[in-house]
Amino acid sequence: MQPAPGGYRVEGVRLAGVVSTVPARRLENQAFEDRLGEAAVADVAKMTGVQTRYWVEPGQTTADLCQAAAERLIERLAWDRASIDGVIFVSQTPDHALPASACLLHGKLGLSPHAQAFDVGMGCSGYVYGLWLASCLLQAGLKRVLLLAGDTISPLLDPDDRATAVLFGDAGSATALERDAAAAPLHFRLGTDGTGATELIVQDGGFRSPCGPAGGIAPTLKMDGNAVFAFTLRAVPALIEAVRVDAGLTAEDVDFHLLHQANQFMLRHIGKKAKAPPERLPINIGKFGNTSSATLPLLLTDAVAERLSGEAATLVLAGFGVGYSWGAVAGRFGPLDCAETLYL
Amino acid sequence: MSALYAGLAEIFEVDESEISPAAELAAFNWDSLAIISTLALVDEVHGVLLDGQALAKCETVADIEALVAKETA
């Protein structure tokens, strides 16, 4: 099969390490039964696979989670902070309307004035977008980049909406990427279908519909689960196949397919369609819920951490959802110098 | 359509004998989870993706079959 247009090959970029962080407050499914009823919670848990999730306390933000992850990662890698040339913060839950949280984090992490720092407002596909942007920066001449990705969706949830209330968790992450001429090539594929923008949306809180202190509107996440599911089935198996073809891989060549942890039922279905056997398609949504842009780093630091710490593995990472937006990367990753999940 | 009936019986957690063209979906808790499961089932059995909103409007098993027939035509 010939590669379809839209694939990009990146050379000389090494993923050195990843740390994920989850907040301390752990919630079991029982915590939702009073509000939603035992049967409804059981139904949603059966479909989504979510058993527990970790939520931030009031005042704790995505940037806090990512800062803790970055501190740990820099320490584990023994990176000189002055050697970090760039910080990308990928999130839909930044600290402020402005400035960019990446700038705040640059200050808190004590990075050098020559380091560039910027935010990218992406969710389910955000981690792959972050890897792509970091790779482009490294190809352009930067030597070391920190990718900070995560979200705290819990404050945006309607406690009476069973489709979302039980599904989401909060998490942050930090990923270290550096220029390395010996690194294996990475193959990226990214795409968008903006006609699906309203199917998964927090309508208020931006400038189209601001929420002032006296405005009385609490920004709330709304999701048309059927529409998002149909989009996913349409887009994701083809995305996985395309990025494998770009990389010259068959399904059997891939040690692990790491897919955005959106919904267990959906992941199993995609796995079948993409010919990814269950033992090579790890699922950890049961532990953490859907943590938006942090699901892929949480797979790296939880589900496949042991393997990647010891040796290299052929991976396909795919993120897809809100936007609609999607991205996938295929290639040889590891061994990582650090792959760790921190429970704050 | 037997694979479809078997799949629907599994989704609705009833015996396959209860699935007939005239069967009313409302009697089987035809909620968003059942609709998503049916989307996946039809994709698996017939290789077509139904429109979620059109599927949600189905009232009987025959309506689902008609929708599938329209998509596979």
Image (tube, grey):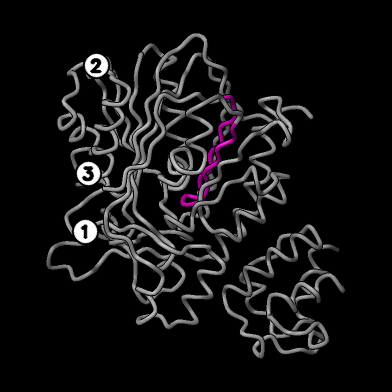
State the image quarter where residue A316 is shown: top right
Picture residue at 23% right of the left edge, 39% below the top: A101
The Cα atoms of the two marked residues, 1 and 2, are separated by 32 Å
Residue A104 lies, with reference to residue B54, above or below; the image says above
**Chain containing the residue with disc 2:** A
**Mark 1 crowd level (few <14, some 14–19, many ≥20, 10 Å Cα):** few
Q: Are marks 1 and 3 on the same chain?
A: yes
Q: Earlier in the sequence, mark 3 or mark 2?
A: 3
Q: Which residue is mark 3?
A: A64
Residue A113 lies in the magenta stretch: no
The N terminus of chain A lies in quadrant: top right
Marker disc for residue A80: 2
Q: Secondary structure at mark 3?
A: helix
> In the displayed structure, does residue A213 sit left or right of residue A168?
left
Q: Main secondary structure of the magenta part?
A: strand
Residue depth check, mark 3 versus mark 2: number of the one nearer the observer: 2
Q: Nearer the viewer, residue A196 or A93?
A: A93
Q: Position of residue A43 (x, y in %)?
A: 53, 75
Magenta segment range? A315-332
Q: Nearer the viewer, residue A168 or B70?
A: A168
Q: Residue furthest left?
A: A214
Amino acid under disc 1: Glu
Q: Nearer the viewer, residue A248 or A81?
A: A81
Amino acid under disc 3: Asp
Q: Earlier in the sequence, mark 1 or mark 2?
A: 1
Q: Earlier in the sequence, mark 1 or mark 3?
A: 1
Residue A71 lies, with reference to residue B34, above or below; the image says above
The Cα atoms of the two marked residues, 3 and 2, are separated by 21 Å
Picture residue at 66% right of the left edge, 66% below the top: B51
Residue A255 lies, with reference to residue A207, above or below; the image says above
Q: Which residue is mark 1?
A: A57
Residue A324 lies in the magenta stretch: yes
